[in-house]
Image: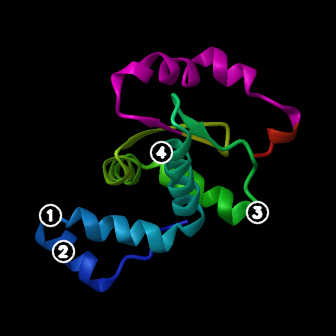
Amino acid sequence: MSLDVSPALLEQAERGEVDEAEFVDCVRTSLPYAWEMISSLVAQLKVDGGAFADNQTPPPDEQARGQLLRALASDAIRGALQRHFGVRLAFQNCHRVAVFPLDSSVDESLTRFTSVRSQVLNQSPEFRDC
């Protein structure tokens, strides 16, 4: 799964710095499932409050799963999304995305979510193929 980079964005990159807002828009249009997932979690966090908001529903298909993996495995994409939405992103298995506020009061929850223990506890036989 690759980003659909416009000729103008590619030209920017070839000249030097890329406008991050244009890069984020490229991510939005290239990875719509991942974008919608993260956007909805950010909205949920704003409405519900709390230490974090997360998704525990597997993606509907391999293309959607690939979008999540692409968005969260790329440091550049993940970093741009975190800056755009003003959150910290966390990821477990092949689909459990979580958004955490930038507030340091939730650092313990983030540490717990991203711990080896939590990763092991979040395993399930039906996720072996993801």
Q: Is residue 102 left or right of residue 4?
A: left
First in sequence, mark 2 or 4: give its number.
Answer: 2
Write the residue at 12% across / 66% down: 16
Q: Are marks 2 and 4 in contact (CB under 8 Å)?
A: no
Q: Alpha carbon of mark 1 to alpha carbon of mark 3: how far?
A: 35 Å
Q: Residue furthest right?
A: 125
First in sequence, mark 1 or 2: give its number.
Answer: 2
Name the residue beneath numbered marker 3: 61
Write the residue at 65% across / 20% down: 118
Residue 49 lies, in percent from the top left, at 51, 36
First in sequence, mark 3 or 4: give its number.
Answer: 4
Q: Residue furthest bottom?
A: 7
Label 2 is placed on what type of residue? Gln
Label 1 is placed on what type of residue? Glu
Decide: few, some or many residues near mark 4? Use Cα within 10 Å; few <14, some 14-19, many ≥20: few
Question: Mark 2 or mark 3: which is in front?
Answer: 3
Residue 100 lies, in percent from the top left, at 46, 35
Decide: few, some or many residues near mark 1? Use Cα within 10 Å; few <14, some 14-19, many ≥20: few
Image quadrant where one finds the N terminus: bottom right
Q: Is residue 86 left or right of residue 125?
A: left
Q: Alpha carbon of mark 1 to alpha carbon of mark 4: how far?
A: 32 Å
Residues shaded magenta:
99-125
Name the residue beneath numbered marker 1: 17
Name the residue beneath numbered marker 2: 12
Is residue 119 magenta-colored? yes
Q: Are marks 1 and 4 in contact (CB under 8 Å)?
A: no
Q: Secondary structure at mark 3?
A: loop
Write the residue at 35% across / 22% down: 104
First in sequence, mark 1 or 3: give its number.
Answer: 1
Q: Alpha carbon of mark 2 to alpha carbon of mark 3: how far?
A: 33 Å
Residue 45 lies, in percent from the top left, at 52, 42
Name the residue beneath numbered marker 4: 46
